[in-house]
Image (tube, rainbow, N blue to C red):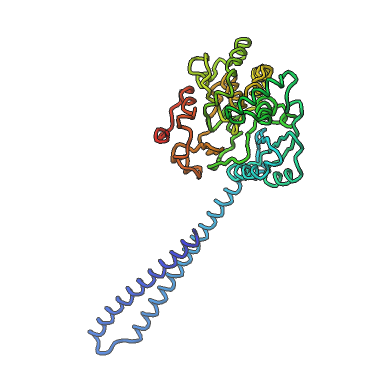
Amino acid sequence: MVRNSVRVTRFAILAVVLMFLLYKLSSSSVDISGMVSNRTKPDLNEFKTEVEETKDTVVDTAKEVANDVKEGAKKAADSAAKVVDNAAAKVISPADYDRENATFVTLARNSDLWELVGSIRQVEDRFNHKYAYDWVFLNDAEFSDEFKKVTTAMCSGKTHYGKIGEEHWGFPDFIDQERAARTREEMRQKQVIYGDSIPYRHMCRYESGFFWRHPIMNQFKYYWRVEPSIKLHCDVKYDVFKYMRENKKSYGFTISLFEYGATIETLWKTTKEYMHQFPQNVHPNNLMKFISDDNGETYNKCHFWSNFEVADLDLWRGEAYSSYFDFLDHAGGFFYERWGDAPVHSIGAALFADKDSIHYFEDIGYFHNPFNNCPTTEKMRLDGRCMCQASDNFSWHSYSCTGKFFDAQGMTRPEGWESQKN
């Protein structure tokens, strides 16, 4: 910018000098003609002297202007250098950043590596390269050397690798195996998604009640869950974990929707039994209106999509949720039906957290097949350099529960939401 300004200034000086010289010469011509009219012979020596004096004046003036420009350019360069130095001083390297007590956490297998690499790159490029938060990887088997080597290279923070204990990944002793097998076959015939899958049930149970109990997780307070094959559409220009702590948030989400009724037929019945036995555990300022349209009589099936969630681990560690999960676990619904961790987490957050501590990250553009959260307003999309269109946004579709969340919280929906309904 300074270099361009100097170039323009030089052209301006040249123009001024030329105009000044023309002016002096034209003035000299008038004087000369006057001399000629009053003399029989023009005084050429006097004319030559005047031209030389004019030349010297122009040169001196040009030097003065050039010196002024040089001095101005030097001052501008010094100022620009100070701005750059000040900006650099404000940029803290990830190694020196005062991070929150937080981590990313991913449940994955070795075969997920290359789909997971894309997710890690998305998170690092859009957010974590500035902060270098740790990353915890959990697996029901040992991670391969390749998995560890590649993911360590991809992550800016420290990586941790944990194996899940058999007591947390398998059938509990109290489960009737024949009954569980009949359920899987019935769901297979009804073509319920993941209805006949045993590993999927183990995963849902583990995410619902055990991932936060893994010894590696004991050192952290906050986590951000990441799965393979996700995308972050927008730059995240602030520390999400710091936002959670400073604003006293316990749970954050991007996408919400209705659960498949065939997978949770007795989940709410069991939840009501728990609330009846332990009414003191339900938070007085709860978010019941998000999960029930009739004050708790029935479950409307709304849940936060837990493949993206940022949460305070103390929410799950607390007596209310811990005892709630244990109650559900012994009811057997993870195996006799196909209870998912998303509705279990969502009901738990809605009942046991202060509703004011539950946050919708509208500005975090997010994709997990097949749904997108794309910021509703154009300003937010441009500010975040989002690679998504308003028409991609699932938040205001009829199958989304985000509108219910806004209503339950008494929040005003963002400008333009109506144009994004399907």
User: Residue 251 or 191: which is nearer the viewer?
Assistant: 191
Image x and y of residue 387, in percent: 50, 45
Image x and y of residue 40, in percent: 24, 89
Image x and y of residue 145, in percent: 76, 44
Residue 398 vertical placement versus 24 (above, below):
above
Work out which residue is located at the far top of the displayed protein and give it.
277
Question: Going 50% across and 14% down the picture, which residue do you hit?
Answer: 295
Residue 130 visible here: no
Figure quadrant of the C terminus: top left
Residue 20 vertical placement versus 376 (above, below):
below
Task: Indicate left or right for 154 with 2 as reference.
Answer: right
Image x and y of residue 400, in percent: 49, 30
User: Residue 102 or 69: which is nearer the viewer?
Assistant: 102
Q: How many marks?
A: 0
Task: Indicate left or right for 153 with 37 as reference.
Answer: right
User: Residue 264 or 295: which is nearer the viewer?
Assistant: 264
Residue 49 vertical placement versus 94 (above, below):
below
Work out which residue is located at the far front of the displayed protein and give it.
189
Quadrant assignment, res 354 = top right
Question: Going 34% across and 83% down the picture, which residue do you hit?
Answer: 47
Work out which residue is located at the far left of the displayed protein and give it.
37
User: Residue 420 or 46: which is nearer the viewer?
Assistant: 420
